[in-house]
């Protein structure tokens, strides 16, 4: 009621039936929809007529569901292509925000691509995917798994211990501690 008092046009409100009909998102020209309308005409009971009506109702529901599927497919045709185009446009507009490769990495990728006989862009995308996937992931309570890209182009997985039980710190580098003690003396 408030929308009516505010003089809003129902054809411009996306949640209304009028909008869906006007925008071509609702099946309005389908003849099977006429059967759903209620008719208040009393008919004398007839068993054969009742059986025919039930069969007709089932058939109509089959036809309606098929037409709705076709209508949906036609309406959604090209949606994936439009979404990909919109994503590519967004990347092209905001390309300055994407991470850049350093010169040494570019040279290494070019050499690696020449060895493998692959395009440099494909290799760059592969390397970036590996680097993005190299974020820290917890293996157990006191371990962290990391992926490191080696200079020869390979990828190795390293498991490092972070801390001991009950939040105690575990020092893996005893040699560094001895060096620190010597520096303070």
Image (cartoon, helix red, strand yellow):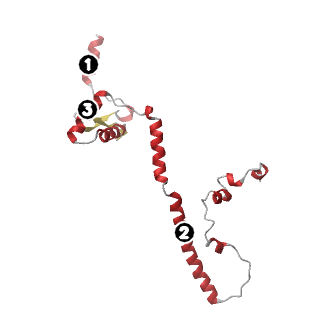
Farthest-out residue, top: 185
Where does label 2 land, which residue? Answer: 67
Residue 114 lies left or right of residue 26; in this view the side is: left
Where does label 1 land, which residue? Answer: 178
Whether label 2 touches label 1, CB < 8 Å = no
| Label 3 residue SS | helix
Q: Residue at x 25, y 42 (%)?
A: 118
Identify the mark nearer the N-term, 2 or 1: 2
Quadrant holding the C terminus: top left
Relative to 23, is 34 above or below?
below
Where does label 3 land, which residue? Answer: 108
Q: Residue at x 50, y 62 (%)?
A: 73
Q: Position of residue 136 (x, y in %)?
A: 36, 37
| Snapshot quadrant of residue 40 | bottom right
Identify the mark nearer the N-term, 2 or 3: 2
Q: Position of residue 30 (x, y in %)?
A: 61, 69
Q: Nearer the viewer, mark 2 or mark 1?
A: 2
Farthest-out residue, left: 115
Q: Residue at x 72, y 52 (%)?
A: 9
Q: Position of residue 11 (x, y in %)?
A: 69, 54
Q: Using the rendered image of the protein, determine whether residue 171 is visible from the camera's viewpoint.
A: no
């Amino acid at each position: 009621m408030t929308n009516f008092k505010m003089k809003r046009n129902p054809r411009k409100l996306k949640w209304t039936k009028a909008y869906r009909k006007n925008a071509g998102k609702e099946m309005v020209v389908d003849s099977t929809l006429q059967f759903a309308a209620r008719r208040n005409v009393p008919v004398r009971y007839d068993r054969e007529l009742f059986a025919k009506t039930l069969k007709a109702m089932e058939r109509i529901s089959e036809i309606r569901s098929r037409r709705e599927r076709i209508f949906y497919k036609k309406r959604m045709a090209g949606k994936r292509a439009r979404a990909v185009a919109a994503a590519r446009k967004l990347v092209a507009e905001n390309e300055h925000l994407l991470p850049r490769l350093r010169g040494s990495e570019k040279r290494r990728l070019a050499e690696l691509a020449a060895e493998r006989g692959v395009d440099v862009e494909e290799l760059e995308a592969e390397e970036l995917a590996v680097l993005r996937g190299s974020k820290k992931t917890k293996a157990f309570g006191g371990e962290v798994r990391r992926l490191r890209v080696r200079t020869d182009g390979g990828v190795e997985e390293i498991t490092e211990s972070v801390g001991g039980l009950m939040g105690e710190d575990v020092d893996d580098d005893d040699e560094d501690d001895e060096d620190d003690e010597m520096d303070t003396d």
